[in-house]
Amino acid sequence: METENNHMDPVGLLPKYFAGEATDDERQLIDDWLSADEKNRTEFDAFSRLWNLTGKAQPGDEINLDAEWQLLESEISPVRIRRINLMRIIRIAASVVLISALGFAGLKFAGMKSEKAPLADLSTLKMPDGSVISLNAGSKITYQKGYGVNHRNITLKGEAYFEVAENTSLPFVISAGDASIRVTGTKFNVRVYKDQDEVRVTVTEGKVSLYETGQSAKEAILSAGETGTFNRAMKVVKKQPVLNMNDIAWKTRIMDFQNTSLSEVAAVLENTYHRKVSVDPSVQLCPLTVRFENQELAPVLNVLQSTLDLTITQDGNHILITGNGC
């Protein structure tokens, strides 16, 4: 296999890589190529952005090849650090435009499947391999045909709790923006919202590998009871030997605040009850120690109001917390 890989062009494998269809050997070849030269990373990032943009196609949309080629030019032209071989660009562009056109014609015909939770409710999915995925409100996963047979690769937007069925010969790989998570069988939570600076992974059972996409050699191994973050701007993975169960309060409905600032409490309430919660600066640092189990939002707000002498007003889906300080 090593001899065969020596004759493969890593750039030519990028469409399979981005589509989640690359084999372990092919992924390793691309990882080695990225590690070999920083200029390769620039080329990889350009095609990654192009792939993500063309991947926005929705079933039923009309095909506009002129627009796709203009998009190609806008994505490739900023990469001037290195002269990229014209034939390599044409080969990748043709692959990307072809896959994009398939998406325009209808994702179902291209073998793509997606599942999305309602905007104000949770959703639980039983995957073909026996894995269970719980989606937070508005969150979405996408995967290709062959899942559970040829691969176990999915793309996540939003937040989900994974209970992955063990299969050492077929790793479970999550694409979460610029970060990737790889496991063989375990339980963990992944949060990847486009308006948040970090991808956050909370492990409750087993082990999880967290790394920047294409940089698996720099992975951080997270064990049960640990939390990992990937900073999108800094491209840095960090591991914390702590487990904050409030990270999965949206699923368990258990919130345990121990001398926790009101601003942090508000963030947990937002993620759990799917309501916008704003806190006046005068009370953001007020500490709260209380535990809630399977409580609706109204009694939780009543406890906050009486405990810290707060004023809580609601306007539609927006909750405003104010007070005289603490």
Image (spheres, helix red, strand yellow):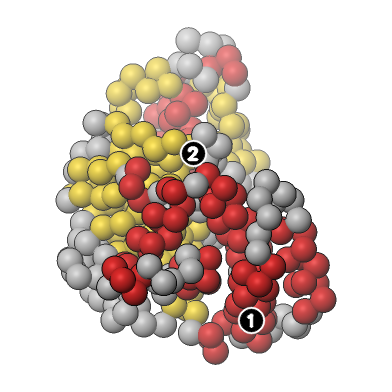
Looking at the image, is mark 2 or mark 1 earlier in the sequence? 1
Question: Which residue does the image show at 71% across and 59% down from the upper left?
Answer: 76
Residue type, label 2: Lys
Which corner quadrant holds the N terminus?
Answer: bottom left
> What is the count of numbered marks?
2
How many other residues sit within 10 Å of disc 2, few (<14), some (14-19) or many (≥20)? few
- Vertical relation: 22 (above or below) 276: below
Type of the residue with mark 1: Leu
Q: Residue furthest bottom?
A: 109
* In the image, residue 104 above or below residue 201: below
131 or 122: which is nearer to us?
A: 131
Q: Residue at x 21, y 39 (%)?
A: 225
Q: Nearer the viewer, residue 160 or 235?
A: 235
Q: Which residue is mark 1?
A: 98
* Above or below 88: residue 258: above
- Mark 2 vs mark 1, CA separation in Å: 31 Å
User: Residue 228, image x and y in percent?
Assistant: 34, 39
Q: Please identify the quarter of the rendering in which residue 279 is found.
A: top right
Left or right, 24 with reference to 10 = left
Q: Is residue 65 visible?
A: yes
Of residue 79 and residue 55, the one placed in the foreground of this image is 79
Reading the image, the residue beneath label 2 is 235
Residue 117 in view of the camera: no
**Residue 190 screen position, x and y as percent:** 38, 50
Residue density around tag 1, few if under 14, some if 14–19, many if 20 or more, within 10 Å:
few
**Within the image, what quadrant is residue 131 found in?**
bottom left
Is the C-beta separation of discs 2 and 1 under 8 Å? no
**In the image, what residue occupies the spot 26% across and 58% down?**
183
Residue 207 is left or right of residue 306, and the answer is left
Place of residue 101 in the rendered image (x, y in percent of width and height, measured from the top left): 67, 82
Q: Dividing the picture into quarters, in which one does residue 306 lie?
A: top left
